[in-house]
Amino acid sequence: MNVGYIGVGMIGRLMAANILAGGFPLMVYDLRKEAMNEMAKLGALIAASPKQVGEFADIVALSVNDDAQVEDVILGTNGVLEGIASGAIIAIHSTIAPETAVKIGKAAAEHRVSVVDAPISGGPEGAIARTMLYMVGGDEASFERCKPLFATSGATIIHMGPLGSGALTRIVHHVILGLNRFAADEGMKLAQAVGLDVAKVCRAVSAGEAQSLVVARYLEKYRDMPTSGQCRVAGMAMQLANAKGVPLIGPALFAQLYLPAVGKR
């Protein structure tokens, strides 16, 4: 099975390297030549365009920044759909709106190509340890075909339902993650104000009922993690909640408090 990977940035390059290590022939594309050159050193083929990746691959995976980039890479000029063969699969790992996944799925279906939305969680450390979570939306047959590929980086691979379900699950995941981040920041702010050792507080909380992965990794990861991505997904959550008539307070509070910090970065 030939694999294409578009977007070999901080996490994408690690996942692409795992695909190579898993024995899959791989072709990559990225706007940055240096990123592609690094993958070439590991044995990947280099593409001149997303279209060429589509011509090569049975499964095209992509990790690009946002909905606009996903649409451009797949639907745009020299995009994946201009080159991909009937029966192939496109796996979208980017965090996108569920309606974007559905839109791309409809366009791909005209080429007899399947789409799965497969957002991931675990960060670079998860990719290195191959313990990532995959939340996958799409038809069952495409999910099963993709599982061996996803297993090169993932320890937990869950079929969430039809196309768009992966993106929906990612939004729910981020609502909970964002509130965990907010709770940890508030608690640690108080700890510092009263003169406690934050590292010891993290150890203490991690052994108690308030424990969370965010607290356990607070000093090494979450304290200084940029919040722009979480604010973007908080916005998705609020739009979805409003459309469904669900009164969510947490995402609105998170975005209100953290957007000023995004502007300062």
Image (cartoon, rainbow, N blue to C red):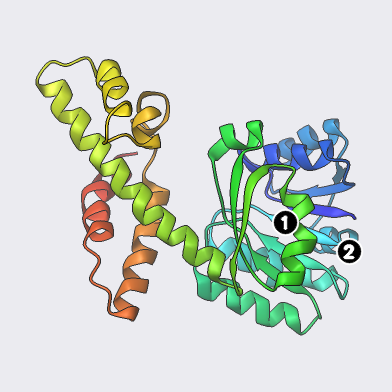
Q: Secondary structure at mark 1?
A: strand
Quadrant where the N terminus lies? bottom right
Asked which quadrant contains residue 194, the reply is top left
Residue 108 percent across, percent down from the top left: 73, 77
Q: Residues within 10 Å of mark 1 (few under 14, many from 20)?
A: many
Q: Is residue 169 left or right of residue 255?
A: right
Cα separation, mark 1 vs mark 2, equals 13 Å
Q: Residue at x 24, y 41 (%)?
A: 183
Is residue 238 or residue 216 the one in the foreground? Answer: 216
73 sits to left or right of 4: left
Three-letter residue code for mark 1: Ala
**Residue 252: % across, % down:** 24, 60
The image quadrant where one finds the C terminus is top left
| 4 to 41, vertically: above or below | below
Q: Which mark is residue 55?
A: 2
Q: Is residue 225 above or below residue 159?
A: above
